[in-house]
Image (cartoon, rainbow, N blue to C red):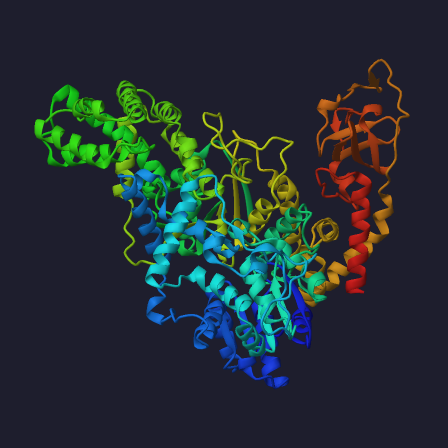
């Protein structure tokens, strides 16, 4: 049986009442939850059917169910929150409060898609256009409607006819009322008020209405309706509410930081009579606010329910080179529970921070590393590329295809198939075909004829030009019969068009004529011109369901423009895209594929090797972009606040790594502020120095090895618990380490921190009997440089620190020991004596060298060393 940590055991032993569990990434929270259920069922003799174990995620629930089986616990009600909502609906149906509409065969995973497609087709019919001319993606429409339902937003509150108290005021259900719900204001809990759905594009509200009317006509229940209708059943019917509150004596919810408003309220109501209610999660991993999650539901739980609070802080996934960065990064968020990841997996990890010249070189570097790792017997499916936006994939995909590395993009298509990209490529291709018709006459190839008509029917409607379908089909038929340019019958039909449409078509023809003249110019310049001429960015934003999705499309377009750089002409670009589209390996069932996925989709997963490209401002964190710009993504200005969710997202990405982490950035763009906040260079170096010491043979261990361990224990958050609970050195190593600590303690007072300004400059140089020592300027000073001082003699610079316009240097002198000097007031000279260099070996004998952190004062370094020494003295006795 797995040995639980003390933190986990405290959760298992929780007896009665509400409880809040903060669990850091990789902490084994599901294990704690399952063991508590096992104790309730076997130790407390609670009937398993009276225990609810739930989560938003089906995968999480399956994991809970599987782990309970290993504990020989059966009968626990393990279900997703959606399934819980469905159970509440059935309670209402079984009591004839609602007509039955939840037969298993009627609840299909694709109902949301079917309804969204039918809503779009209805709107297209009413407007006499094709569906794609609406410019609204079916998946985005699904997501938007899902978000509305998760947050109790209806397309028309009057049509829904909710009870008055639900749609006008915050309320809470009380257990002693039979026929109504008591209404009163809540200061701590979220508002339980149903609202009217809103969107800057009114088409989305109308489509929501069509979606709901189609659903009701077919008597269907979608997955989102399981929640919103389940909530309605609770607040409409006292009988359902009473039955639901009697079902469970204990309720345990995993991943609570991801719950939406409707889920929060369902759980609040069913636990109202018996608050044996435990929620588990991590506010630092709340990354789904765009779909309704709110970290405040989790953070305020203790206050709202007077809950007992627990922490699980030990990470069983990642080595120090990742946990150190994660701790440093997330500490910059203000709206969070203060906590840290505590290390358990030691220092045998790797984090590479790599700066590449451009996106092309970054992609080539990723491919080079993947091939090198495969040569070392790593499998490709043990690696992942995590992107903030799918706009980051074009260069990476092209490099993978060129080198025949199979890959899968989870959550999106290959970049050249995405609608926002294929539309622009269709413009280029159709302009190329149109030029061919005008120069060489009609096509001899049947394939080109079909492409000519098909691409025209697409681009004429994007952006929307309000041209009726019958006109589009008519001009295509005429052009094909007459074997002439489509432009000819299109111009002839303009007399029958509305003024607005006619002006739109005139603009289209002008755009195509200008585009044909630009085809042989630089591909990226031509694309940038086309995007600007079509006002394509605004079109994508307006027709996207959510701002996040609109910005992602805009960024993907900008990525295509950057990707086109280097292709001399548009035909060259089209030929290259065609080449890589045919060169991509088919997904034929081979499981050894590289995964490319978003940081959002990576949550809850882990890989031995993680690549995070484009660690630059504008990519990570992301922001709204405008093209043209000298950067693929605009950088945040210094005054722009960074949304805390962006930092949480990067934290999630870092903590997916089990072994190796690659943080890649471009030199031509400002590095991500998150790299600075994570103190990547300093903390990785500190961890690597500790790794070097701990991996040394005992006989080779010396005092210089002990110092970085003592300092690192104080500099790097989350290490002390590892050394006290998880570090198990061999006895000889432990004894040698302890001996060196004693020697270090005896010498530590040699480090002095003084301000010295007593030197007097004499004629700019110092002269001895045989030679002149040259005075060193500030620009001449460097770490490890050998120097000479009039008072202290020979020495070596071991640290340089610049802060508040002052430069302090630490010098290790042969006879005077360590001195910290103000460089502006101190005169140092070249270290030569009768033509001989300073005796470096003599200086190193029996003295210490401190690892220097970039922004630390030297007195802080000494204090850190002393504190680390005290820690290990207490630990090792």
Identify the image quadrant of residue 132: top left
Q: Is residue 604 above or below residue 576?
A: below
Q: Can residue 371 be seen by looking at this rendering?
A: no
Residue sitting nearer the eye, 771 or 245: 245
Above or below 318: residue 490:
above
Nearer-the-camera pick, 789 or 726: 726
Q: Position of residue 245 (x, y in %)?
A: 58, 75
For the residue pair 261 and 795, the one nearer the viewer reads as: 261
> At 33% from the left edge and 60% from the top edge, which residue is drawn?
217
Q: Position of residue 569 (x, y in %)?
A: 30, 24
**Which corner quadrant holds the N terminus?**
bottom right
Residue located farthest toward the right when viewing the structure as drawn: 758
Residue 864's spot in the image, x, y percent? Answer: 79, 48
Residue drawn at (84%, 42%), measured in percent from left and top?
751
Q: Position of residue 768 (x, y in %)?
A: 84, 20
Question: Which image quadrant for residue 798?
Answer: top right
Observer-nearest residue: 307 or 732? Answer: 307
**Left of 570 or right of it: where is 357?**
right
> Does residue 786 appear to the left or right of 614 in the view shown?
right
């Amino acid at each position: 049986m797995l040995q639980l940590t003390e933190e986990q055991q405290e959760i298992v032993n929780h007896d009665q009442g509400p409880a809040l569990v903060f669990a850091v990434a990789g902490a084994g929270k599901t294990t704690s939850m399952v063991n508590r259920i096992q104790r309730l069922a076997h130790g407390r003799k609670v009937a398993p059917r009276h225990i609810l174990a739930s989560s938003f995620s089906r995968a999480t629930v399956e994991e809970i169910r599987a782990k309970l089986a290993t504990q020989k616990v059966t009968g626990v009600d393990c279900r997703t929150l959606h399934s819980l909502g469905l159970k509440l609906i059935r309670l209402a149906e079984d009591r004839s409060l609602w007509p039955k509409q939840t037969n298993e065969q009627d609840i299909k995973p694709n109902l949301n898609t079917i309804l969204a497609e039918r809503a779009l087709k209805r709107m297209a019919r009413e407007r006499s256009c094709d569906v794609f001319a609406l410019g609204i993606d079916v998946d985005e429409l699904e997501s938007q409607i899902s978000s509305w339902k998760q947050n109790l937003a209806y397309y028309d509150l009057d049509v829904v006819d909710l009870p008055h108290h639900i749609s006008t005021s915050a309320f809470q259900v009380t257990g002693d009322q039979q026929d109504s719900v008591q209404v009163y204001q809540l200061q701590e809990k979220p508002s339980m008020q149903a609202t009217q759905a809103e969107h800057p594009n009114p088409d989305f509200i109308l489509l929501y209405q069509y979606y709901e009317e189609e659903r009701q006509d077919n008597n269907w229940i979608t997955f989102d309706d399981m929640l919103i209708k389940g909530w309605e059943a609770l607040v409409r019917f006292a009988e359902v509410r009473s039955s639901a509150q009697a079902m469970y004596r204990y309720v345990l919810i995993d991943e609570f930081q991801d719950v939406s408003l409707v889920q929060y309220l369902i759980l609040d109501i069913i636990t109202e009579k018996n608050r044996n209610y435990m929620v588990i999660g991590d506010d630092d991993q709340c990354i789904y606010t765009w779909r309704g999650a709110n970290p405040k539901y989790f953070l305020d739980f203790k206050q709202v329910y007077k809950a007992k609070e627990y922490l699980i802080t030990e990470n069983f996934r990642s080595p120090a080179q990742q946990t150190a960065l994660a701790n440093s990064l997330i500490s910059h968020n203000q709206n969070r529970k203060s906590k840290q990841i505590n290390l358990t997996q030691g220092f045998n990890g790797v984090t590479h921070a790599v700066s590449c010249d451009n996106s092309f070189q970054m992609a080539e570097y990723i491919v080079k590393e993947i091939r090198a790792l495969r040569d070392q017997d790593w499998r490709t499916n043990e690696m992942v590329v995590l992107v903030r936006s799918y706009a980051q994939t074009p260069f990476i995909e092209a490099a993978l295809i060129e080198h025949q590395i199979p890959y899968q993009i989870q959550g999106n298509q290959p970049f050249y198939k995405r609608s926002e990209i294929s539309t622009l490529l269709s413009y280029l291709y159709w302009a190329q075909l149109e030029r061919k018709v005008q120069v060489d006459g009609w096509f001899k190839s049947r394939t080109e004829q079909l492409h000519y008509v098909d691409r025209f029917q697409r681009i004429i409607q994007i952006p929307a030009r309000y041209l009726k379908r019958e006109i589009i089909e008519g001009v295509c038929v005429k052009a094909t019969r007459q074997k002439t340019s489509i432009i000819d019958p299109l111009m002839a039909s303009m007399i029958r068009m509305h003024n607005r449409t006619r002006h739109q078509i005139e603009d289209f023809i002008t755009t195509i004529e200008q585009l044909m003249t630009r085809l042989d110019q630089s591909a990226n310049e031509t694309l940038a011109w086309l995007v600007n001429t079509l006002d394509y960015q605004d079109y994508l934003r307006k027709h996207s369901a959510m701002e996040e999705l609109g910005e992602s499309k805009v960024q993907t377009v900008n990525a295509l423009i950057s990707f086109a750089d280097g292709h001399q002409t548009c035909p060259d670009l089209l030929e290259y895209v065609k080449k890589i589209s045919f060169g991509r390996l088919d997904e034929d069932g081979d499981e050894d594929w590289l995964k490319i996925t978003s940081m959002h989709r990576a949550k809850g997963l882990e890989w031995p090797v993680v690549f995070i490209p484009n660690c630059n401002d504008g990519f990570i964190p992301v922001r709204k972009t405008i093209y043209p710009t000298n950067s693929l993504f605009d950088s945040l200005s210094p005054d722009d606040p960074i949304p805390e969710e962006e930092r949480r997202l990067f934290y999630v990405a870092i903590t997916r790594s089990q072994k190796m982490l690659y943080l890649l950035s471009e030199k031509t763009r400002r590095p991500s502020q998150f790299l600075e906040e994570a103190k990547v260079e300093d903390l990785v170096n500190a961890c690597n120095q500790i790794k070097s010491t701990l991996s040394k043979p005992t006989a080779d261990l010396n005092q210089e090895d002990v110092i970085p361990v003592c300092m690192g224990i104080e500099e790097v958050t989350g290490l002390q618990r590892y050394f006290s609970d998880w570090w198990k050195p061999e006895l000889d190593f432990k004894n040698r380490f302890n001996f060196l600590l004693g020697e270090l303690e005896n010498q530590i007072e040699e480090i002095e921190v003084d301000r010295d300004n007593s030197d007097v400059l004499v004629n700019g140089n110092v002269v001895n009997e045989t030679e002149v020592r040259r005075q060193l300027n500030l620009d001449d000073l460097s770490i490890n440089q050998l120097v000479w001082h009039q008072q202290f003699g020979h020495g070596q610079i071991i640290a340089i620190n610049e802060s508040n316009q002052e430069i302090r240097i630490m010098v290790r002198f042969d006879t005077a020991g360590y001195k910290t000097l103000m460089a502006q007031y101190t005169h140092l000279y070249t270290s030569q004596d009768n033509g001989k260099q300073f005796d470096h070996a003599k200086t190193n004998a029996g003295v210490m060298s401190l690892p220097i952190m970039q922004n630390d004062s030297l007195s802080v370094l000494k204090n850190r060393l002393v504190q680390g020494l005290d820690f290990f003295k207490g630990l090792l006795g």
